[in-house]
């Protein structure tokens, strides 16, 4: 008689309960992947070859296989919390050692690196000084926390409608302080090389020439002599329309502002580069029989800005939001996939390392190939089904009890043989 089958069954049930217990214990671990115990029967080797009467000698734990199915996604308040919706793993650097995880609970350390709660650095693509993502070999993502430098205005675009029904102004000589010397006006802010804002105002004057208009400009309310619209400082630029109300004057034209004289007129000191040169484009402006209106009025300069927030796109691009209203890309998180994810070796902290069985990591951006998309301000919960685990626990308990009963029965039979006289 043999106790081997019952003993192997007890060991298998015990190991199965260990797997279930580990799953249940990690039901709240972000990015955790549940495991399942796979069992196999055991037969003794036979020199006589195969036979139909062999009786197995029990069971064994063949493998513990992790299930890389998708876990539920839960929203959070941290913009750097990332959940992978689909395949792939985050790529981490632990002092040069590369690990992989599905736990996207990230934050920024004192040096600007995006790190896990354990301090491992998230890898991806960096960005240059202009905010362009540099897609090369993955590096530790370090976010620049320095102020965004100002950009001087280099171009202005405006689309307006000038009322064709208007008459020339009552006052023939233009003065920005005399509303009777112009028909309409509009203003916007422009920026010098130091990021100082200046108010640029345009004044539109209907002329005696049919379908003709003159445009004057001032900066910060000072004299029009400080602005050269291309016809000499203080002189207007002329534009014309056809009988259909379409602009016929070639665009754009060059504008130059004497910031030194503006500062003198205001009793200030100017430290920015002067003159401030930019182009102005009124393409699309019309002259219809409708009230004056501004459809578009924009320029490309801005003052300096301080980082005020972060946002992450579905393909992993981390953008910085600045106090001057600008945004700039600071880096991009990459994902990795494997030919055989079940070949990865778990090392704890819901992390895995590459092995020969997993195959080499295939690194790319989220949403490409077999890689899933990223959901910012969210985490992926463990894929543990507690109901299924509790049912498995009951099944394994019954399995343990049944195998214990076979040992008990074997013991009773052996006792009977021993007691034969």
Image (cartoon, rainbow, N blue to C red):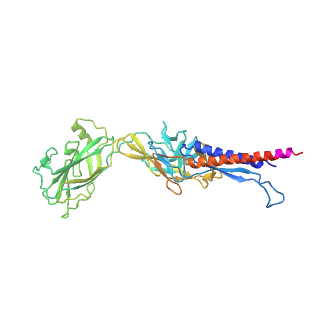
The image quadrant that residue 190 belongs to is: top left
- Residue 71 lies, in percent from the top left, at 53, 50
Does residue 18 appear in the picture of this structure?
A: yes
- Residue 293 lies, in percent from the top left, at 21, 54
The image quadrant that residue 263 belongs to is: top left
Of helix, strand and loop, which mostly describes the magenta segment?
A: helix
Rendered-image quadrant of the C terminus? top right
Residue sitting nearer the eye, 259 or 341: 341
Question: Farthest residue in the left direction?
Answer: 170
- Residue 320 lies, in percent from the top left, at 41, 44
Residue sitting nearer the eye, 108 or 78: 78
Give the vertical position of 214 relative to 142 (above or below). below
* Residue drawn at 26 percent across, 40 percent down: 260
Residue sitting nearer the eye, 196 or 1: 1
* Residue drawn at 23 percent across, 50 percent down: 229
Residue segment shown in magenta: 414-419
Q: How many marks?
A: 0
Residue sitting nearer the eye, 125 or 151: 125
Does residue 98 appear in the picture of this structure?
A: no
- Residue 343 lies, in percent from the top left, at 63, 51
Magenta-colored stretch includes residue 412: no
Question: With 294 as the anchor, is 352 left or right in this view?
Answer: right
Question: Farthest residue in the bottom direction?
Answer: 243
Question: Farthest residue in the right direction?
Answer: 421
């Amino acid at each position: 008689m043999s106790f081997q089958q019952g003993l192997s069954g007890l060991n298998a049930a015990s190991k199965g309960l260990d797997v279930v217990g580990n799953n249940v214990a990690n039901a709240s671990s972000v990015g955790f992947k549940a495991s399942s115990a796979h069992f196999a029967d055991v037969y003794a080797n036979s020199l006589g070859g195969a036979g139909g009467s062999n009786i197995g000698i029990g069971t064994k734990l063949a493998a513990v296989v992790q299930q890389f199915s998708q876990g539920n996604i839960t929203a959070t308040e941290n913009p750097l919390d990332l959940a992978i919706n689909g395949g792939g793993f985050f790529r981490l650097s632990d002092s040069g050692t590369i690990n992989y995880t599905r736990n996207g609970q990230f934050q920024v350390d004192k040096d600007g690196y995006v790190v896990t709660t354990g301090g491992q650095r998230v890898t991806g693509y960096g960005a240059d000084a202009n905010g362009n993502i540099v897609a090369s070999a993955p590096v530790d993502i370090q976010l620049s926390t320095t102020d965004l430098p100002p950009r001087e205005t280099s171009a202005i675009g405006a689309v307006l409608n000038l009322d064709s029904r208007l008459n020339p102004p009552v006052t023939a000589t233009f003065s920005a302080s005399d509303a009777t010397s112009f028909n309409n006006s509009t203003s916007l802010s422009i920026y010098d090389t130091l990021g100082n804002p200046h108010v640029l105002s345009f004044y539109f004057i209907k002329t005696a020439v049919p379908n003709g208009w003159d445009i004057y400009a001032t900066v910060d309310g000072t004299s029009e002599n400080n602005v050269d619209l291309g016809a000499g400082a203080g002189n207007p630029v002329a534009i014309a329309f056809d009988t259909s109300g379409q602009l016929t004057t070639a665009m754009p034209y060059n504008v130059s502002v004497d910031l030194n004289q503006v500062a003198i007129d205001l009793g200030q000191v100017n430290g920015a580069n002067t003159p401030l040169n930019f182009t102005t484009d009124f393409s699309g402006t019309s002259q219809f029989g409708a009230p004056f209106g501004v459809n578009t009025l924009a320029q490309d300069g801005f003052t300096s800005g301080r980082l005020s927030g972060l946002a992450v796109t579905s393909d992993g691009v981390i953008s910085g939001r600045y106090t001057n209203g600008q945004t700039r890309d600071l880096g991009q998180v990459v994902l990795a996939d494997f030919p055989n994810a079940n070949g990865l070796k778990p090392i704890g902290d819901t992390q895995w390392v590459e092995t020969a069985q997993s195959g080499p990591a295939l690194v790319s951006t989220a949403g490409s190939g077999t890689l899933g998309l990223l959901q910012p301000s969210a985490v992926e919960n463990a894929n543990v089904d507690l109901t299924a685990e509790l049912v498995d626990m009951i099944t394994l308990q019954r399995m343990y009890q049944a195998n214990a009963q076979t040992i008990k029965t074997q013991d009773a039979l052996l006792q009977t043989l021993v007691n034969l006289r």
